[in-house]
Amino acid sequence: MKYLIFISLLLAPLFAAEPEAAELTRHLERLQAERELSMLRLGTQYRTALERGMQQATQAGNLDLYTALESEVSRFQENPGIDEAASEPEFLIRMQGTYREREAEILREYYRKLLQLSSEWDRHLQQLERSYVQEGDMPKAKATREERLAFQEGPEQQEARDWLAAQPQPNPQPQPERIEAVAGRPVPVARATEPAFLSELPLLDSKTAHGKLGLNGEMGYGKKGKIPSIRGEKLLKSVSMFPPESGKAHADFNLQGAYRNLSGAVGLNGGSARRLGGKVIFRVYGDGRLLWQSKDFKKGSEPQKFKISVAGIRSLRLEAECPGSNKQARTLFIEPKVW
């Protein structure tokens, strides 16, 4: 807004009657509105991710993570933006890193367009100055020259040049991109530096026929305190779900485009594989696209391993389907990990 005021004052004495000046002002107003809307959207997405992280921390019984995220939600509501980065926990550090990456992309796009508009207006003033000289109207030519020089040194133009000059050069290596409703452009993703179990990442949505989704050592249904296991081995980082008869169960996780690979296995809890009444099909989707599907899992089937690419994937879905009977369909995604 401060830039629009500056432009209005600058143009008023000499160019207010020119249609080009009015068009420039409209472009600047639109550009400013796009920036403000993009930042509002980014703030909403950040708060939503924090709140989902609080839900996951609640399910995992992680008080430290819940308290840290609760504090960040409160701070962000009072003072949107991130001035000082968190030192822990790792989940919040990743979230803040992603926010800053996207904020920088919004500013980068805004400043580039601003300087482009400024350059176009400067060319227009040069042509106007030349025409006044050719007409012999030297007072207007000199006034145009003064306005042009003042315009070139505008406060936000200088701010834009300084900000862009201070940014690190882009990595020449090809980087996957995610498409976000932020300035309507591809936004570089923030890379995760450490592997993570899916059960530790933000849960976006889930559906299961019995109880709730099982995460971090919980079955989610049946006897309280029962831990997922196969052949007596406890699987504390598995994702447990119970699909309905002739239906599907699922769990959606927010990867934020920060990981390249996913590995794990699928199977049935305890001795359920020996008592399975129908068959189960396991699937993995990335941003709505099928990435992997198991062979039909039938009575007596052994766990099936998978390793797939998730580069650039924002939302990952784990799905278990029972085309018919769901008797003993105690499905497990066995300790799936991303890195």
Image: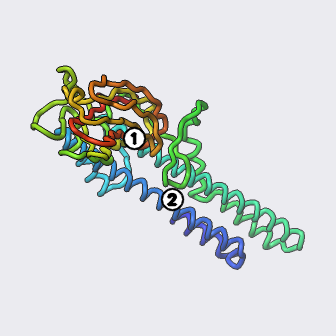
Q: Earlier in the sequence, mark 2 or mark 1?
A: 2
For image coordinates 32% across by 34% down, the residue present is 198
**Residues marked 2 and 1 touching at CB (< 8 Å):** no
Left or right, residue 24 beside residue 184: right
Residue nearest the viewer, comparing 200 with 132: 200
For image coordinates 48% across by 40% down, the residue present is 189
Left or right, residue 164 beside residue 218: right
Q: Position of residue 42 (x, y in %)?
A: 42, 53
For image coordinates 40% across by 37% down, the residue present is 284
Circle 1 SS class: strand
For image coordinates 61% across by 52% down, the residue present is 112
**Residue most extreme to the left:** 224
Circle 2 SS class: helix
Q: Position of residue 225 (x, y in %)?
A: 11, 34
State how far apart marks 2 and 1 are (Cα).
29 Å
Amino acid under label 1? Leu
Q: Which residue is mark 2?
A: 35
Amino acid under label 2? Arg
Residue 12: quadrant of the picture: bottom right
Q: Is residue 14 above or below residue 151?
A: below
Q: Position of residue 288 (x, y in %)?
A: 45, 45
Q: Residues within 10 Å of mark 1 (few under 14, many from 20)?
A: many
Q: Residues within 10 Å of mark 2 (few under 14, many from 20)?
A: some
Q: Is residue 34 above or below residue 218?
A: below
Residue nearest the viewer, comparing 220 with 36: 220
Q: How many marks?
A: 2
Q: Which residue is mark 1?
A: 316
Q: Which mark is residue 25?
A: none
**Residue most extreme to the bottom:** 17
Q: Nearer the viewer, mark 2 or mark 1?
A: 1
